[in-house]
Image: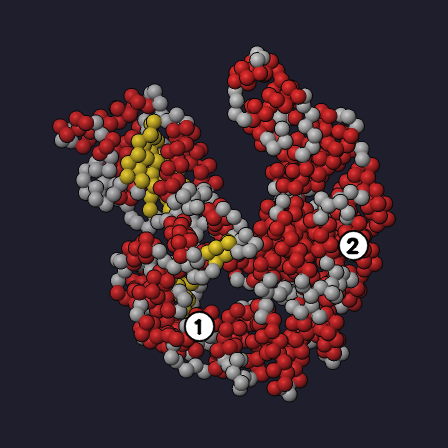
Amino acid sequence: MLDSEPFVGREAELAAVYEGLTDPRCSVIAITGSRGTGRSRMLEAALRMSRELGASVELARATSAARNIPFGAVARMLPQHVSGWSAPTELIRTMVALYAEQSSRTRQVVAVDDAQLLDPESATLLHALAGSGHALVVLTLDTDAEGPDTVTALWKDLGGRFVSLRPLRITEISTYLHENLGGPVNGVLVRSVAEATEGNLLWMRELLRGALEAGAIARNQDGLWELLEVPPLSDRLQRLLSDRLRHASAEALEVATWLAMAGDTLPISALERVLEHPVPSAAEAEGVVRLEGRDSVRLTHPLYGVLLRECTPRLERRRRRSALVRSMLADTPIASAELVHVLCDSEECDERVDTDLVLRAARAAMDGGDYGIGWELSRFAGADSPEATSEALAVAGECGLWLGRVDEAESYFRRARCRTSDKDLRVDLTLGLAANLFMVAGRAKAAEELVNEITAHLPPEDSRYQYAVALRVGMAANAGRMRAILAEVEESSIPALTAARISALTWTGRLHEAVDAVGSLTRVSGPDQRPPSDLDQIVSVTALAYAGEFHEARRRAHSGYYETLRNRRLPEQAMWAAAWSEVEMLTGNLRTAMSCLLEAAGIMRRRPTSLGPAVHGACLGNLARVAAMCGESEQAERALEEGEELPLRECFVPELAGARAWIESGGTDLSRRRQELWECVAEARNSGALLYAARTLLDIARLGWGEEASRALAEIEGELQGVVVASWVRYVRALAAGEPDGLVRVSEELDARGMRLLAAEALLAAGGEFRARGRTVAATGVEHSGAGLAESLGARSLLNAARAAEVPLTKREKQIARRVLAGSSSADVAGDLGISTRTVESHLQNAYRKLGVHSRDELARIYGDFL
């Protein structure tokens, strides 16, 4: 682990370097970036590619020590008799002539790491070599440091290729962690590393190394790497950071220390209040701080704050934090996030705060969707005290609801209702209590009674009435009552019901209308029309996916997930991950689907979603199904058990029934599971959820009851829209007919549509039918194709079934194949069996043809366990 870093987020840069290496007109490639972005590693990759292309390579490393020595950086490249020359120009002419002679035989590549440290003479020599066309010069340059003009001229004057390395984006950090740690990573860890390192590869590697050594990260029960505690700074990382700050002036370090105490960022007004003078320009000029927007200042790197907090004595930290509290509470609006950072360290802050001001900041944070900040501030404002005001309790209750603090949220709401006579506040509290009962406890009927009580006494234009109606629609969705949702939506013009309408149109099978509704979201304009919410966009992903627009659905899901990851909105992050998994399940990308579902399930375990417990149950059902398909039986069982323990008595969750059937699909008696699936179909049809019905019928056919499923699908086919469902119908009919050539054609259609898992299943089903008809060669061919596709998708259960099919070889062919798989050469096999090498090769080629493979490697990979 961490021994060999993956190349992540550098595909375009590697391609640009390769183009320069293969372009005979290119004389200079400049690889630039700030410290820690991987310049040296990119240079190593460039040299490796140069050698593979047949070039002769020379590498020099410029250093501060050799900067004042003429030709110091390139001394090892110079001829041994150079000491007799006095004029640098004579040496440069000699070197150009030498490289001219060598370049006539093979291309010459001269590489210099940290070229900003070159002495002028070495830079002039490299300029002459590149300008003569006899050598390609590859440089790395630190953009944080100034180099001599002769170095800049190397790539500017000669029009070389400029390859700029940037910090990794959050999506690339996620991939980096996944590949480095050898397994999926949860979003909290990704976000924490991204915020701490800002994508700097050097910081990321050292932070990760220190976290592993200290046990700050580990795999959880689901196999996801997660953050257990704040990663400590390793000794090496502390030295690197100290080296960066060593040359900062005293006034810049003073500004940096105040920012570190506040969590890296402060409004300029609050900072200048504690400094008692304007922010000195030197702090920005020296690269210690930077402006954030128009009104805030932040440290240029979060790890500076970690180091400065560790280096500041405790009493000094206490003094500074008290001063920061006074300063921040004097601002309007109050900087809520920074205030929480200071107040959370209560042992180091002895300032008595104005709770009214803190409560005002808490409400502002809650209204802005920052529920974690609102939760912390409401508790600082006294929500936990016996004398808590009803307003503090209301804010704590609502924030706690969205953070998944179930019992605490309900307690806050009930205490607040007992303490207030204000009618408006009682309505707010009743709404919060209803949401808590529905979203977390699954008590939809009790919640609906409270909602009906509210809607009976509020005008439709009241935002609380609209929220109550949206809540009631959510309850209907949990119960699968799609017709009821559409009826409610048609009677109302509430903008917040847009998501409910798209979702209902999707699950009733009216996918053309659902996609049209999605299109209308992107055409929102005018001051009176609200932009699409997260929920609007999440249900849009599902609609687009089931309409067959997989590329667009995946793009939106990817973008939405990482946006919520950056903004710390955990409930929405879980819903985005679940929506993304839906796309990947439809297209058969089981590994990606598994990672998304593990992430979503992990968050929902601790946080509710606004869509209620049915979404959590569906997530766990899908996780159990995907795990079973991937051959992860223990994970599948755990997910199913967790799903069955949820409060789902009033919910419609066909995913759990489907998961049970898939997990037990290898058993002998599936009659009970078959009955459960048919009950799901009946319930879905009765409530109008025809897409659910079609999806369950597809499962019934895949599990071996194709004829029954085909007849039922024919009854609802006319009410369903979209290419995905149409492909399902043709696949189910092909399974029912059992005609192998038809299954092969359906497989080709499914593959072309992007539904590759179903395509693999269809090929394997065709192989079984071919084999039953005695067409062994045809069976082997399609089974091999199906197995290869299943392997690429991570469908281990399918792959095992394909490999276990009868291997159609003669006794002699099996005998030879087994010896070849054991590592014997053809000559060795011939000697062992007393036959000629030519006969061995003939038998081996016959075996390859029958099994549909082309090499020993393919034979071992596909059939190694079954010969």
Give the mark toward the camera: 1 or 2. Answer: 2
Residue 607's image quarter? bottom right
Residue to which mark 1 is pinned: 344
Q: Which mark is residue 766?
A: none
Which color mode does the image show? secondary structure
Q: Quadrant of the C terminus?
A: top right
Residue 331's image quarter? bottom left
Q: Nearer the viewer, residue 464 or 317?
A: 317
Q: Earlier in the sequence, mark 1 or mark 2?
A: 1
- Identify the residue at image location x=61%, y=82%: 415
Q: Amino acid at mark 2?
A: Glu
- Identify the residue at image location x=66%, y=55%: 640
Marks 1 and 2: CB-CB under 8 Å?
no
Residue 307 drawn above or below residue 789: below
- Identify the residue at image location x=65%, y=26%: 852
**Residue 272 % position (x, y):** 35, 72
- Identify the residue at image location x=84%, y=42%: 707
Q: Which mark is residue 676?
A: 2
Q: Nearer the viewer, residue 713 or 330?
A: 713
Number of numbered labels in the structure image: 2
Q: Can residue 511 be seen by looking at this rendering?
A: yes
Q: Nearer the viewer, residue 184 or 21?
A: 184
Residue at disc 1, secondary structure:
helix
Q: CA distance from mark 1 to mark 2?
A: 51 Å
Q: Amino acid at mark 1?
A: Cys
